Amino acid sequence: MLTDGCGRRVDYLRLSVTDRCDLRCSYCMPTGFKDYEEPAHWLSFDQIERLLSVFARLGMRRIRLTGGEPLLRNNLTELARRLAALPGVEDLSLSTNGTQLAKYASRLKAAGVTRLNVSLDSLDRRRVRAITKRDVLPQVLDGLEAARAAGFSLIKVNMVALAGTTDADIENMVAYCMERGFVLRLIETMPVGATGRDAGYLDLRPVRERLRARFGLVDGVVPGGGPARYLVAPDGGFQIGFITPISQHFCATCNRVRLSVDGRMFLCLGQDNAVDFRRLLLDGGDDAAIERALLDGLRAKPARHEFNQQPDRIVRFMSMTGG
């Protein structure tokens, strides 16, 4: 079992397979951003499989494929198939913006991906275009329907709550997810890079209580390895999660690390600590060296982020870190 220096079990890896994205969401990537990692520096599928085989042997049980937009990585379903087959991996999921999902949903399911998180901040076409800088709402909705038809065990819709923007759309999104059997998750913005700091933070605690009262929801649990706190309908027909890294941080139960497309394992979104696994592989490190680097890195995992105390500390953008 993998544990960090604070005694927390760490069994969840968020694996970025690309830092490219076909959207330019205002809270994630600045207008005109071009500081992408060179593809020559990306971890290859063979390198990823080798690293994760060691990670899984030590106790990394959950893997989530992320980006950027992971479905822009060529042959991603082949990587998914290889990772799903690794001994020790119990859960393989994927986060996507949904623009390519109609094309890939059935193939992802066949490759071994069991759960999806789809980013969708509004059902208003103009608002989606304003946030993403692309007119993509019809594509995303088609992708969600394709995913539903493919039979994934769980589909979650991730909605970033933005003060003065998407906060007006929350009730509409609740109704949409209720009708289709999706789990809705509302997310507070984090001050990761200037885009995150300028996005329009909304405290979700009042929203949670408003929705609890309006829809008769009660505290509940939904499968997954993430930090959301859930409300559910008493009949189990609807679930809504709240991810509140600022208003109610969940650092004491943090169970995850992030591996960027260039092989750096970030130990905390709010800190710069990282382990460079790509360099280790290029230097000929064997499995024992990978194990040592992982265990040493986890011992240095910070106790908590410092977003409230030092909101300007992290200058990298979310797309550079991995979702």
Image (cartoon, rainbow, N blue to C red):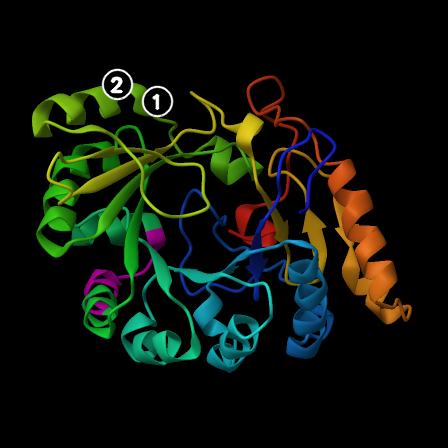
Is residue 176 rendered to the left or right of residue 242? left
Tell me if residue 38 can be seen. no
- Magenta region: which residues? 132-142
Residue 206 is marked as 2
Residue 203 is marked as 1
Residue 174, image quadrant? top left
Residue 135, image quadrant? bottom left
The residue depicted at 54 percent of the width and 47 percent of the height is: 318
The residue depicted at 74 percent of the width and 32 percent of the height is: 5
Give the image location of residue 271, x and y in percent: 68, 34
State whether residue 286 is above or below residue 163: below
In the rendered structure, which amino acid carries the disc numbered 1? Answer: Asp
Q: Secondary structure at mark 1?
A: loop
Q: Main secondary structure of the magenta part?
A: helix
Q: In this rendered view, identify the residue nearer to me: 266 or 169.
A: 266
Q: Secondary structure at mark 2?
A: helix
Give the image location of residue 85, x and y in percent: 54, 75
| Circle 1 crowding by C-alpha within 10 Å: few under 14, some 14–19, many from 20 | some
Q: In this rendered view, identify the residue nearer to me: 101 or 293.
A: 293
Q: In this rendered view, identify the residue nearer to me: 224 or 284.
A: 224
